[in-house]
Image (spheres, rainbow, N blue to C red):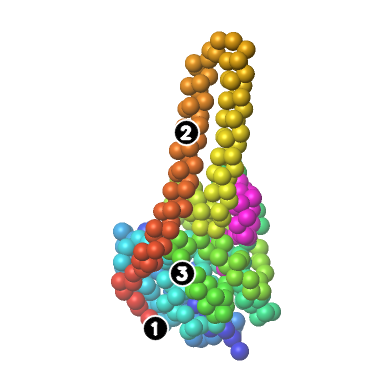
Amino acid sequence: MPARLLLVFPCYNESEILPEVLPKIFDYFENLVASKNISEKSRICFVDDGSIDNTWQLISKIDKPYVNAIKLSTNFGHQKALLAGLETFRDKFDVYITMDVDLQDDINVIKQMLDAYFKGNNIVYGVREDRSTDTVFKKTTAQLFYKLMNFLGVKIIFNHADFRLIDNKALNFFLAYKESHLFLRAIFPNIGLQSTKVYYKRLKRVKGNSKYPFKKMLAFAWDGITSFSAKPLKMVLYFGVFSLIISLILIIWASVQLLLGNTITGWFSIIILIIFFGGSQLFALGIIGEYIGKIFIETKKRPRYLIDKIIEK
């Protein structure tokens, strides 16, 4: 029996690219239905993440019987938009696939994902074969990101973003995670259900600009680290112990020099030490503050997103 699929596309200021990609999305989806790879009850869901252009106007005017749409009240972020699309249609479909609407993730891989699902996998990760289309800077920073996450003990799939298939069981497991700071790339590998990977070549963006510039990617990476690893806090502790040892050595050295009658000079070196340890302490307090800030946000239990409008067919 064909699976009921929900294909979720988060959208933020995508009015420039939507006219280019919508025909491709609809053609591929209709072919999946015609070939009985998915049920006729399958749907596509576009989630407008508080766009300030006419993205919602374009989405709301789509005249297709299989297209649903959600409009968030403001911009809650990519991860929350994905959550809104998945949670709104919980238990209504067999499988859910999330991907970016710019189609840089190859939509043709969906057939392979469905095949992997029918072989018994609850989660199927879309993984890039290589980063040949990236600039040297982006490729280097991406590799550093994955290596850093691995070093900090965060379980994450190398070269996987948010192009994935999950079944309804995996979705319900995922929705048991109630934190406000969502980092989906680490949550799903921690669920523990049977999973596999499908590989694809990332395509070039047809139009428009990426919604994840370097500054935003850096913030996203930091959010993921502080949401899934306590190692930065342990590193603060280790640095504190190291500083204490250095201080004791300096105290002993200064005492010996004083007993020997040597004049202790070195105003400049003392100032350097004060600046170094003072700056290090402020840095450590900043890391601790990040974790405390996350606790503060979580305890408020604020809604993770707010839906303004829903179009369901």
Under mark 3, the amino acid is Lys
Mark 2 — residue? 279
Question: In the visual, does 40 lie left or right of 196?
Answer: left
Asked whether residue 3 is drawn in magenta, I would say: no
Spatial distance from mark 1 to mark 3, Cα to Cα? 28 Å
Residue displayed at 62% across by 76% down? 122
Residue displayed at 63% across by 71% down? 192
Please determine whether, in this image, residue 209 is positioned above or below residue 48: above
Mark 3 — residue? 178
Residue displayed at 60% across by 70% down? 191
Residue range of the region highlighted in magenta in the rendering: 143-164
Question: In the visual, does 129 lie left or right of 272?
Answer: right
Residue displayed at 53% across by 15% down? 266
Badge 1 marks a residue whose secondary structure is loop
Under mark 1, the amino acid is Lys
Question: In the visual, does 309 lie left or right of 6?
Answer: left
Circle 1 packing at 10 Å, graded few (<14), some (14-19), many (20+), is few
Q: Which of the two discs, 2 and 1, labels the residue nearer the N terminus?
A: 2
Q: Quadrant of the N terminus?
A: bottom right
Between 174 and 4, the one lying in front of the other is 174
Mark 1 — residue? 313
Please determine whether, in this image, residue 273 is positioned above or below residue 49: above
Q: Which of the two discs, 2 and 3, labels the residue nearer the N terminus?
A: 3
